[in-house]
Image (cartoon, rainbow, N blue to C red):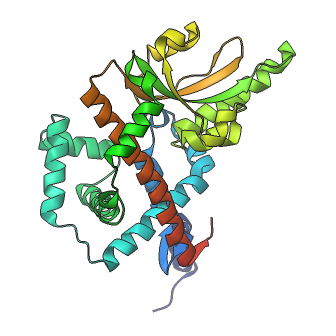
Amino acid sequence: MKFNRISLLVVLFIFCAFIDVLYSSVLLDRVVAVVNKEVVTWSDLYKMMESEASEQVKALNEEERRKVFRDSEALFLEKLIDMRLQIQEAKKLGIEVTSEDIKETIESIKKKYSLNDAAFEESLKKEGMTLEEYKKRLSEQILVSQFVSQKIRNKIIVSDEQVKRYMEANKEIGESEAFRLRQIFFKTPKDENEKKPVMEKASLVIQRLKAGEDFSALAKEYSEDPSGKIGGDIGYVKKSYMAAELADMLSKMNTGDFSAPFWTETGLHIIKLDEKVSKQTTDELKASARRQLVEEQFLEKYKSYIKGLREKARIEIRL
């Protein structure tokens, strides 16, 4: 049976449409990195960015949100590579996550946020995720957590002597209400007309913070204060010693929050509240000091361990 001219055109049209869909699919899932022969795709990267986006980023319209994601691709790809390396190592050690582990974690999350089954599944739908996709992601997070605990956190020991020395060096912590702060600081320009570029730079920092970038890393990159070299850490500041503008800003913040840019007579500040400490008993101070020392040791050892994984891995970035 011979095709007539119209039939042939229809077949060609359908074939071209199929090729177009196939090509788009390949583009969507293009390889952005290879980690020890394991492929990382563009869609893997964007799913991670969507899941870790702050509420401010999620509230943006699609075009603005995509722009923030594009600007953050390189940063999140590094995080995704680190996660893949840890998952690979965990599997080598024979660490496994059971279906019961996942079930217990989901039940704990539902209890924490007072969600029934329907409300929980509806929240996943809003995030653009199926239950199976969520279980897979949760399984990876539990696996990495168990791996990190086994290889690093469970091996950290803080002695009573270390706690004592820390308390002696930070006696002011327990005397009155205090705040452990980080800051990104820009000096006040001599010319009033130069304030606008400073504000624009601060706005860029805020945009990057909202996209999930690390405050300490941005402090090292941007801050004009000496504390920038150590991630903007300015230690504990007692409320009684604070400038009025800073005290007012902190009154609106919770632990973990970062502020909008604000001016004082010295310059433009963006602050992050790491910890809020009220007057404590001796036992409370010891417990707080021990937690702080454990966390400091953990971060140091974790960064060193990840660096070691990267050095012995074969990583190819194609972003």
Q: Is residue 81 visible?
A: no
Residue 92 coordinates in the image, percent (x, y): 34, 79
Left or right, 21 with reference to 120? right
Q: Residue furthest top?
A: 244
Q: Quadrant of residue 220?
A: top right
Residue 110 coordinates in the image, percent (x, y): 16, 42
Left or right, 306 with reference to 153? right
Q: Residue furthest bottom?
A: 1
For the N terminus, give its image quadrant.
Answer: bottom left
For the C terminus, give its image quadrant.
Answer: bottom right
Q: Residue at x 32, y 52 (%)?
A: 129
Residue 155 coordinates in the image, percent (x, y): 32, 61
Q: Residue at x 24, y 60 (%)?
A: 132
Q: Residue at x 28, y 46 (%)?
A: 124
Nearest the camera: 50 or 216? 216
Left or right, 111 with reference to 229? left
Residue 45 coordinates in the image, percent (x, y): 49, 59
Q: Is residue 110 above or below residue 157?
A: above
Q: Residue at x 27, y 59 (%)?
A: 142
Q: Is residue 93 above or below residue 254?
A: below
Left or right, 104 with reference to 5? left
Q: Is residue 4 above or below residue 187?
A: below
Q: Is residue 233 visible?
A: yes
Query: How many marks overall?
Result: 0
